[in-house]
Image (cartoon, rainbow, N blue to C red):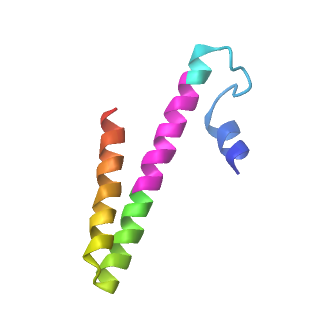
Amino acid sequence: MTKWLIKTFVKDADNLQDAMVRSAYGKFAGIVGILANILLFVGKLIAGVISGALSIVADAFNNLSDAASSLVT
């Protein structure tokens, strides 16, 4: 699946000598990381609210802050 995603979203993905391709890899990795943190936030928030565990809710907000800091960088 990773190879398919890279081929779909990174143009000329095999040309690693090109700075634009390397930049596209970096942007792609950043976007995937942000989306993963948002999905973790949602899942942990739901699990924390359902179970009543404050620690899981706090961890969910930690994932949200990770996503926010990734957006800044």
- Could you tell me residue 67's position as x and y percent? 35, 48
- Tag count in the figure? 0
Part of the protein shown in magenta: 23-37
Quarter of the rendering containing residue 9: top right
Name the residue located 65 percent from the left edge and 28 percent from the top edge.
11
Name the residue located 41 percent from the left edge and 70 percent from the top edge.
43
Quarter of the rendering containing residue 55: bottom left
Residue 45 drawn above or below residue 36: below
- Could you tell me residue 27's position as x and y percent? 49, 32
Point out the residue furthest to the bottom here.
Answer: 51
Residue 46 drawn above or below residue 12: below
Quarter of the figure that contains the C terminus: top left
For the residue pair 52 and 31, the one nearer the viewer reads as: 52
Name the residue located 36 percent from the left edge and 40 percent from the top edge.
70
**Type of secondary structure dominating the magenta stretch:** helix
For residue 37, side relative to residue 4 (left or right): left
- Could you tell me residue 1's position as x and y percent? 70, 51
Point out the residue furthest to the front here.
Answer: 55
For the residue pair 62 and 32, the one nearer the viewer reads as: 62
- Could you tell me residue 45's position as x and y percent? 33, 71
Name the residue located 72 percent from the left edge and 43 percent from the top edge.
3
Q: Is residue 45 magenta?
A: no
